[in-house]
Image: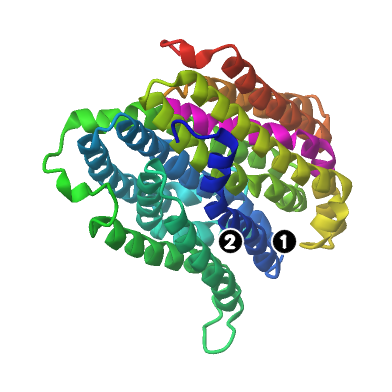
Amino acid sequence: MLEGAILPTMLRLIVGNLAVIVVQAALVLMEAYYISWLGYDAVAGITLVVPLVTLMLTMSTAGIGGGVSAVVAQALGARRLELADAAALHAIILGILFGLGFTAAELLGGPALFRAMGATGGALEAAVTYGGVFFAGMTALWLYNILTSILRGAAILRLPSLVTLVGAAVTLILSPALIMGWGPLPQLGIVGAGLATVIFYVGATTFLAVYILSGRTQINPLRCRRIELRVFWQVLRIGLPAAANNLVTSGTLLLIAWLVAHFGTEALAGYGIGSRLEGAQIPVFAGIGTAVIAMVGANMGAGQVARAERIAWIGAGLAAGVSGAIGVFGFSLPAVWIGLFSSDPAVLDAGIGYLRTVAPAFPFVGIAGTLFFASLGAGRPFWPLFFASTRLVVAVGGGALAGIALGGGLEAVYAAINVGLIIYGGGTALAFGLGSWRCRTA
């Protein structure tokens, strides 16, 4: 972690996540495929919920969870075991509070939000139903990702990876079974998709909680005897700006879906299917980012800033390569991808247009995502937040102006999304390259 060759060390940390990356990407894609069996109203409905789901995943892993991983890694790098134990206990408390809070918020305000975004009829019904079921299990999702973040900060990646792998494989079978009512299981439709995911998080959280609290790792939250505001602040000092970054990113996706909804349900479904390829990259740079957080955090804790920066660049290069490969596929064979989910001409046209325009910018998604994880390990998340906000203004504001106000249509909205991605990834890399980690105010 502190002295070995960077790339071999990083690959050893990543290897435990490789299978998980593949399975999580498959889950993201297969869930859309399963729900497409219910018609494009169902696909359009979950397209409105997916940004909220992405927000919860990113806030609990790369947001508050990122703050947890950074504090734990820095504490262990500085050989302060008592701070690592305290951060773990306080993080668990935060996970419970955030989970319960977001469950209440969605159940109370979700239907009004989806209506405000333009959902009507079957699409509105699908969004309200799927969102209600998924968010009912939100505390389990938050706790699972907080516990995983604790282990990630200690560079323990293989166990949570194995748990995720087994649980995801079960979910991959359980989800269509509950949707369609295979065998003795009831036919629950779109409820089944959300319920299968909730079952996974409850089971996985229970297993990881028993493992950590049993004292089998160098970190044990039970050794911390006091609840202190200063420890909450140490986690939130990094986690809140990171969570704000996640909020801006998910808000961008939500507002883009709102823009696309102006062009009809078929357009929204096509965009939703095409953008699944962008969403599938999240597990990719998250898998690389888990290794980057641990390595950067440990080296920053030990005062090895230059080595931490080299780690970040190597991780960003790996992520850009994978994201670029996904982009090549989406740009070269868009009809093949969209055709897997729908044969409706309007849906095909909207989805193909999205991939032809936006897929070439996918490498910037990997670069920005990985450097974001690196900034969490360093405790300096300002610039990723700044350029994520810039992406929001360009993609949503530019899309609304060019696509709706000036009559440019869906093509103009997609062009604004493309420019926003380039600014997000390119700007983050530029700030990092100019030495943002060496500037305390940043």
Which range of residues does the magenta coloring cover?
353-378
Quadrant in the picture for the N terminus: top left
Amino acid type for the residue under numbered disc 1: Tyr
Q: Position of residue 186 (x, y in %)?
A: 52, 83
The kind of secondary structure element at disc 1 is helix
Q: Position of residue 55 (x, y in %)?
A: 50, 43
Q: Position of residue 73 (x, y in %)?
A: 37, 35
Looking at the image, residue 145 sits to the left or right of residue 94; the answer is right
Residue at x 57% of width, y 25% of height: 310
Say if residue 143 shows up in the picture: yes
Residue at the farthest left position: 225
Amino acid type for the residue under numbered disc 2: Ala
Work out whether mark 1 precedes mark 2 in sequence or the reverse, and give the earlier one. Answer: 1
Residue at the farthest bottom position: 184
* Residue 366 located within the stretch drawn in magenta: yes
Kindly indicate whether the residue at mark 2 contacts the one at mark 1 (C-beta within 8 angstroms): no
What label sits on residue 126 in the rendered view? 2
Residue at x 80% of width, y 56% of height: 338
In front of the other: 257 or 426: 426
Q: Which residue is mark 1?
A: 40
